[in-house]
Image (cartoon, helix red, strand yellow):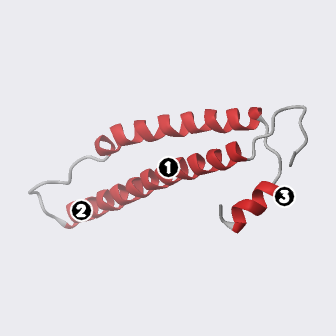
Amino acid sequence: MHDAEALTEIAGRAVTTDQVDGARRHLVMVRSLLDEMRGTTHTLVPAGPGSWRSSAADGYADGLAYLRERLGGALSAVADAESALEYGIARMERRLVEPGTAAGS
């Protein structure tokens, strides 16, 4: 165990099963959102204007590229949130204190 983890185990705030369960419920919601985003993101932005070229078509294509980039960033952010929540839950589980017991006992 690293020194920082040992310090957290000794001085960290106590965590209840209700808090861990709440975090797990949020993880289920984040995973559901991530699955939905992965399944629909590619359908949200239409294909570019194709062979029709004009300044308007170029602007439209640029706008679509920007939208695809933003959607990809959102997908990445939700995936990062899932990972962070998984890590946080694991840390909470290590600090779990059953009701009626003193923290650090």
The residue at which mark 1 appears reads as 78
Residue located farthest toward the left when viewing the structure as drawn: 51
Q: Closest to the observer: 37 or 23?
A: 23
Residue drawn at x 8%, y 57% as measured from the top left: 51
Residue drawn at x 79%, y 37% as measured from the top left: 16
Alpha-carbon span between mark 1 and mark 2: 33 Å
Query: Residue 3, how many percent across, how many down?
Result: 71, 67
Determine whether label 2 and label 3 are within 8 Å by CB.
no
Element type where label 3 sits in the image:
helix
Q: Earlier in the sequence, mark 1 or mark 3?
A: 3
* Residue kind at label 1, given as amino acid type: Val
Alpha-carbon span between mark 1 and mark 3: 31 Å
Tell which tag, 1 or 2, sits nearer the viewer.
Answer: 1
Q: Earlier in the sequence, mark 1 or mark 2?
A: 2
Q: Closest to the observer: 5 or 70?
A: 5
Image-based side of 82 in relation to 41, left or right: right
The residue at which mark 3 appears reads as 11
Tell which tag, 2 or 3, sits nearer the viewer.
Answer: 3
Q: Is residue 88 above or below residue 102?
A: below
Q: Closest to the observer: 101 or 58?
A: 101
* Residue kind at label 3, given as amino acid type: Ala
Tell which tag, 1 or 3, sits nearer the viewer.
Answer: 3
Q: Residues within 10 Å of mark 3 (few under 14, many from 20)?
A: few
Element type where label 2 sits in the image:
helix
The residue at which mark 2 appears reads as 56
- Quarter of the image that includes the C terminus: top right
Query: Residue 73, how many percent across, how many down?
Result: 43, 58
Element type where label 1 sits in the image:
helix
Residue drawn at x 36%, y 42% as measured from the top left: 38
Alpha-carbon span between mark 2 and mark 3: 61 Å
